[in-house]
Image (spheres, grey):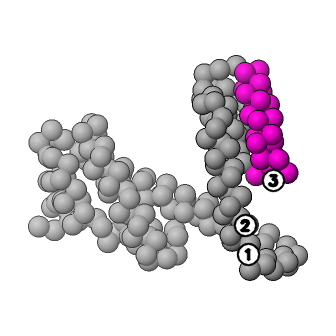
């Protein structure tokens, strides 16, 4: 069956008649190479393009039951590939920007031979101190310093007021300073 025949067969069938697996096999056989070529033109890398297309097929498989018109499946795949390529390009831009900043940063002092052991011990001490905090304080500190959320985002996530976020963060910082002594700084969580 040619790709036109397969696409026509897909268009003439109602989504309810095709299982997600049947639809994907048909679309994959008919359009894989075309979609990869599209992605290669956008991301300029064969391997990355294939990953983007594969992700689009996987996403469509998971959403097949919600697709109202089977003939829109190819348009959905093209849009998914285009959006996936945009995401890859945005990621590359961020990586390139950070790499450029690192190139212009002054050379760091070479760490001593015991650096890894000291860092590991310090990390363990911080994790132990975090585990000793009450649950809400631990959640606030983790959301603030691990996920870098704002007070408003933490309040929304935990469904508490911004004042409660500030209070829990302050109490947690005090407890951590007491427990860790000089090894604790606000940026080490």
Residue beneath disc 3: 183
Distance, label 2 to label 1, CA atoms, is 6 Å
Looking at the picture, how far across and down is residue 39, in whole percent?
A: 45, 67
Q: Is mark 3 on a helix, strand or loop?
A: helix
The residue drawn where x is 43% and y is 75% is 47
* Stretch of the chain drawn in magenta: 162-188
> Which of 28/186 is in front?
186
Residue at mark 1 to residue at mark 3: CA–CA distance: 16 Å
In the image: residue 11, left or right of residue 84:
left
Q: Mark 2 points at which residue?
A: 118
* Disc assigned to residue 184: none
Residue under pointer 1: 114
Q: Which of marks 2 and 3 is nearer the N terminus?
A: 2
> Is the Cβ of the residue at disc 1 closer than 8 Å to that at disc 3?
no
Tell me, yes or no, whether the two marked residues, 2 and 1, touch with CB atoms within 8 Å. Answer: yes
Identified at 64% across, 49% down, the residue is 127
Q: What crowding class fits label 1: few (fewer than 14 Cα within 10 Å), some (14-19), or many (20 or more)?
A: few
Q: How far apart are marks 2 and 3 (CA)?
A: 11 Å
Asked if labels 3 and 2 touch by Cβ distance under 8 angstroms, the answer is: no
Magenta segment main secondary structure? helix
Q: Nearer the viewer, residue 9 or 122?
A: 122
């Amino acid at each position: 069956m040619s790709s036109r025949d397969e696409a026509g067969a897909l268009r003439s069938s109602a989504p309810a008649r095709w299982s997600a697996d049947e639809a994907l096999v048909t679309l994959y056989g008919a359009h894989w190479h075309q979609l990869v070529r599209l992605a290669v033109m956008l991301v300029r890398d064969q391997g990355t393009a294939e990953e983007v297309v594969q992700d689009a097929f996987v996403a469509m498989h998971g959403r097949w039951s919600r697709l109202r018109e089977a003939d829109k499946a190819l348009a959905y795949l093209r849009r998914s590939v285009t959006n996936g390529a945009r995401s890859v390009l945005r990621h590359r831009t961020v990586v390139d920007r950070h790499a450029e900043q690192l190139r212009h940063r002054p050379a760091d002092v070479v760490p001593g031979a015991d650096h890894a052991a000291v860092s590991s011990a310090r990390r363990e001490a911080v994790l132990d101190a975090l585990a000793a905090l009450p649950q809400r304080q631990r959640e606030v500190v983790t959301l603030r310093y691990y996920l870098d959320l704002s007070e408003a985002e933490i309040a929304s996530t935990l469904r508490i007021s911004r004042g409660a976020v500030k209070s829990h963060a302050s109490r947690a910082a005090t407890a951590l300073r007491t427990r860790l002594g000089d090894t604790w700084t606000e940026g080490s969580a």
